[in-house]
Amino acid sequence: MTDDSSYTPPKIWTWDAENGGEWAKINRPISGATQEKTLPIGKNPLQLYSMATPNGVKVTVMLEELLELGISGAEYDAYMINIGDGDQFGSDFVDINPNSKIPALMDHSASGEPQRVFESGAILLYLADKFKALIPNDPAGRTECLSWLFWQMGSAPYLGGGFGHFYNYAPFKMEYPIDRFTMEVKRQMDVLDKHLADKQFICGDDFTIADIAIWPWYGNLVLDTLYGAAEFLQASTYENLARWTHEVRKRPAVQRGRMVNRTWGELSEQLHERHNASDFELRTQDKLEQEK
């Protein structure tokens, strides 16, 4: 390892708005709204304000899985929150999530005031409990499922804000942080690979919110659709993790959910807003037109 000791932290840190790479313009050391902005409200019981980042995909996959089970109460409108443009700092969004992070959900199905839910893991658990689906009923199974859900919530910052930032987004490459976070991400992948050696899904034979939480991060890492780092991490060598990744990827609800609030990639894989199931049929038609 090279020794770069040219930086000495100042006695008191001050914010440099230009320091931080690709996402520097949306990072700041204070919270709260920066603009007055009203969010749209659709006709469905559930209103989702999000973007198809891994944390956003968790919730759209969850909702599509619930609909796949025939749970009509999970119908939802999904509106795009473009974090690159700073939409998460609009006044209405901050009212739902004071932490200004996607995704954020409003449930208008109950009597009285709509229920706000923020943090992706909290949304998954809220929906699982609300619809009594995709989470084990027995105490032991539920506890195991929640352990893996919270494992993901605690582990992903090392993958995203740690490895992903320094490997892919930082303004210049730095050996020490890349080396440090690569080691941790590979350890996490090894945890999953060993765990999945004798299990179809994270909690055994049943697909649960644990799979929904973990797949958008670690599955996309294996598929090389996250940070372009699959070769660097030798992701294909984690054979059990790869098997699970591809099995989950084939699920129709996962294929639909990963499209919602996506504004990049192939046009046929983008669905900027979602209001009902027919929106996906329009995307399918776009794909057919492209392939002619």
Image (cartoon, grey):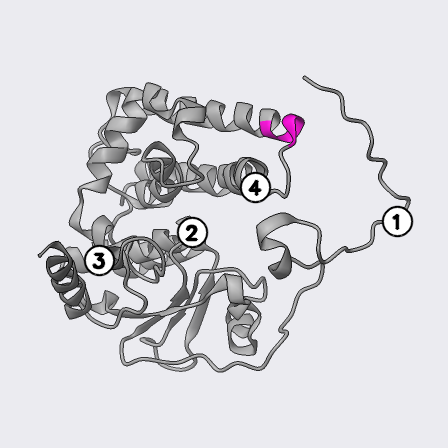
Residue that badge 1 annotates: 12
Residue that badge 4 annotates: 165
| In this view, the mark in front (2 or 3) | 3
Residue situated in front as seen by the camera: 92 or 107: 92
- At label 4, counting other C-alpha atoms closer than 10 Å, the crowd grade (few under 14, some 14-19, many 20 or more) is many
Q: Amino acid at mark 2?
A: Asn
CA gap between label 3 and label 1 equals 49 Å
Residue situated in front as seen by the camera: 68 or 241: 241
CA gap between label 4 and label 2 equals 16 Å
Residue at 36% over, 61% down = 263
Instruction: Find the magenta span and give its range.
Output: 174-178
- At label 2, counting other C-alpha atoms closer than 10 Å, the crowd grade (few under 14, some 14-19, many 20 or more) is many
Q: Secondary structure at mark 4?
A: helix
Residue at 34% over, 40% down = 215
Q: Earlier in the sequence, mark 4 or mark 1?
A: 1
Q: Amino acid at mark 4?
A: His
Q: Amino acid at mark 1?
A: Ile
Report the magenta stretch's main SS. Answer: helix
Residue that badge 2 annotates: 55
Q: Secondary structure at mark 2?
A: helix
CA gap between label 2 and label 3 equals 21 Å
Q: Earlier in the sequence, mark 1 or mark 2?
A: 1
Q: Earlier in the sequence, mark 4 or mark 2?
A: 2
